[in-house]
Amino acid sequence: MITRLLRTAALAAAVLGFAGAAQADYPDKPIRYILHVSPGGATDVMARKLAIAMEKTLGVPLVVENKAGGRGAAQLSDLAAAKPDGYTIGAVTSTHIGAFNQTLKQYKIDSFDWIARLVNEPYLIVVNKDSKIQSMKDLIAASNERPGNVVMAGFVRGSGGHFAWEIMAKAAGVDSKKVRWVPYDSVGDAVTATLGGHAEAAIAYVDLVKTHVDAGNLRVIAVMADQRVPQFPNAPTLKELGYNADTSWQQMRGIIGPKGMPDDVKAKLADAVKKALETPELKAYITESSLVPAYLGPKDFTADAEKQDKITKQWMEALELTR
Amino acid sequence: MWDGFLAGLSAFSSWQVMAGLLGGVVIGYVVGALPGLSAGVGMALLIPFTFGLDPVVSVVMLVSLYMASEYSGAIPAILVNTPGEPSSAITALDGYPMRERGEAGQALTLSILGSAVGSVLSTIMLIFTVAWMTKIALAFGPAEYFALAVLGLSLISTLAGHSVLRGIIALLFGLLLTTIGTDPVDGIMRYVVSDGLLGGIPFVAALIGLFGLSEVLKMLETRGDQTTPLKDLPGLSAQFGLLKPHTGNVIRSTFVGYILGVIPGAGATIASITAYSLQKRLSKSPQTFGKGNPEGVVAAETANNACMPGALAPMLALGIPGKASTAVLVGALAIQGVRPGPLIFTQHPEIPYSIYIALLVGMPFMVALGLFGSRLWVRLTTIPAGVVTAMVCATCLLGVFSESNDMFAVSIAVAFGIVGYLLSKVEIEPAPIVLALVLGYMMESNFRRALVMSGDDPAVFYTSPIAAFCLVSALIVFVLPLLQNFRSRRSEGEHAKMGGNPSKV
């Protein structure tokens, strides 16, 4: 009897010990890091830099794979089908959460494990230097004086930037129906349209407008952040202007994995991300690209994603974008 | 200006910069010649290797890769009717028939020389006009882009080979295909039977299918041991002389390429099509276009290479990447802490000037490689067709996969290969389909964007001078050839009547 008990205990210990060892060994082979973008863009470059930095902590290579097909569909289907063993991870941005609610409805927040958030990018409003609108006040006045005549350029309807505008408009008391949201294929295209005077204003990020603001061709009239951004010390935040908007609504980048990854694997990856963000190379790149370091671990990141998803759903409903 | 030029020149005294230049050209040749591996993808693949490099070395390497791959797309287009770059689809229209006549060496010579002259002249224009060109780039809003796309599509009546009707059928088929995907304004999914289609039909896959794989299917009909006898090329100095009769064509095509390059989003394919159509209109023998007229090869290749320095204008002076490859350049510079834009000429003058110098200094090397190649890789045509077919098929499929890392794109390419083959049986050519695939989305998205902007007021399309000009030109460009066609047919008919042979009409 006792021998049997002992044997069982030994077996259990062996099994447990073995399982523990298996995860302690993680990672012992290369990790696939799947992106939803083509090579060369800002998200791709950042991911590659992150991969190099994480290799140092994890001791195995992170192999970056670009799967840009179907606006994220190719990446997500690959990621969802992968084994949740920590050897397949993927890049995620706020745009994914928008897609979960529009084009890729087969996925939800809990279809994936949210590992870590890397950075945020606050939204801001820019106008052409020759525009009659030179401040948030002008914008509000213009929208009332000539309803339906003010053109706001940005990314597609239902995107993070579109909702950022709605959130700002609501806070500032602008009836957003009086302003025309003109969707462009990218935020960069919307900035170009504003630069050419085809649109009066655009919702964009710091990095995309910095050189034009520095050259005096564009002007930032409001930043949706708690503090002024260091790149534009003269551009007021919404709060300073007296408008209370949810500044946590920002464009984020992070990493996710297939559903059901072991907690300690997630913790290891998140830890490697955290350490990577502290390296001088990545720090310099983040500053250079006007991004805001915004690390969150698995638990907080999941909560953050759920919150963004909830806000997205509310706005989809309010703007009658749900179909 | 001269200070910047000197700063750029002094950078070229370092061996690293020269090594980057030569390395870029060689890699560019390979990247451009492989279908599916476009200039943008090739440059992006190189980016991780530039992390530790000096900014000038990095940008010189990428720009010379870009330059060389814009040319070398013509090599497979001429030799196996498979464009290595999208824009060389137009080169294939006459380049491949020339190769079938055994004139592969001549076609390759004309393509490299045309490319070289187009690129150099265009670079010189870039150096002197970069500041003004930003105005053109910014003048295009939604209404103007729509009108430009219509003007592009109107070229169909010139581009279509022997039958305008078939050309229009192909064009409309292509336009129908561009409705697939996520709607550009409302985000509604249209005919998205598989998630892979959310972003529309993958263009590169469709292109490779229509040209490369359908050619593979066609080759299956011929004997496997067939080879093409090669006509001899003249000596080196006489080889240069081959381009001489095309001087006017080269200058016109350079201009077309440069201007269309400046407009963000227009791109090399549209430049090639426009220059090709223009040359066909002006040619003394338009009826031989599409059947191996060297003028077609010269026009297409000159224009797509002249387009590249043009595209650098908005990229450098405004930081606007007009296409995938310039977007990669912007990314590569960002890694180095250099932001292209209005301030680059004062903050980092060595960057634009070293790009100019790279484009000029790299050219003799590119030409040497190209002329050498016109004697070397033409030998491909002496390999039995069966072997070549297998090689082309494998390269096409591999190229499509490597472009997207996705098997879905491969199945699209195969489907388009079959479609292209079947269409060729009813004498419908793939070029108008490509024209539609390039311009359809641009036309629709900007038409709708313009109307959203104006509050559904169609006046935007004729109150903007640029848009009005483009639309009127489109009408003329579309109708004129049809009228001439009609007139020449009628006069032919009258001749026939007089000759007493009405059955010919």
Image: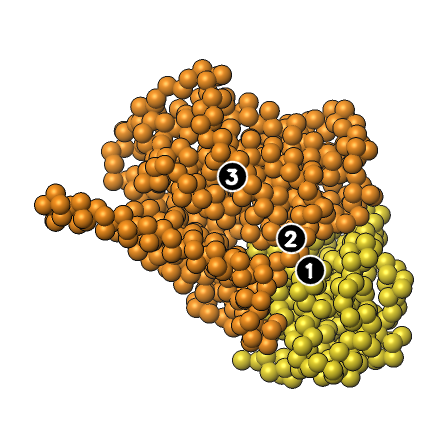
Chain colours: A yellow, B orange
Residue at the spot 60% in from the left edge and 51% down from the top edge:
B263
Indicate the position of residue B59 as horizontal and vertical percent values: 70, 38
Calculate the distance from the C-alpha at mark 3 to the C-alpha at mark 1: 28 Å
Farthest front residue in view: B498
Q: Secondary structure at mark 3?
A: helix
Q: Residues within 10 Å of mark 3 (few under 14, many from 20)?
A: some
Q: Earlier in the sequence, mark 2 or mark 3?
A: 2
Q: Which mark is residue A196?
A: 1
The Cα atoms of the two marked residues, 2 and 3, are separated by 20 Å
Q: Amino acid at mark 2?
A: Ala
- Disc on res. B137: 2
Q: Are marks 3 and 1 in contact (CB under 8 Å)?
A: no
Residue B296 shows in this picture: yes
**Residue at x-position 46% and y-position 46%:** B273
Which residue carries the number 3 mark? B252
Q: Badge 3 sits on which subunit?
A: B
- Number of the front mark, 3 or 1: 3
Res. B52 in view: no
- Image: B159 above or below A250: above
Secondary structure of the residue carrying tag 1 is loop
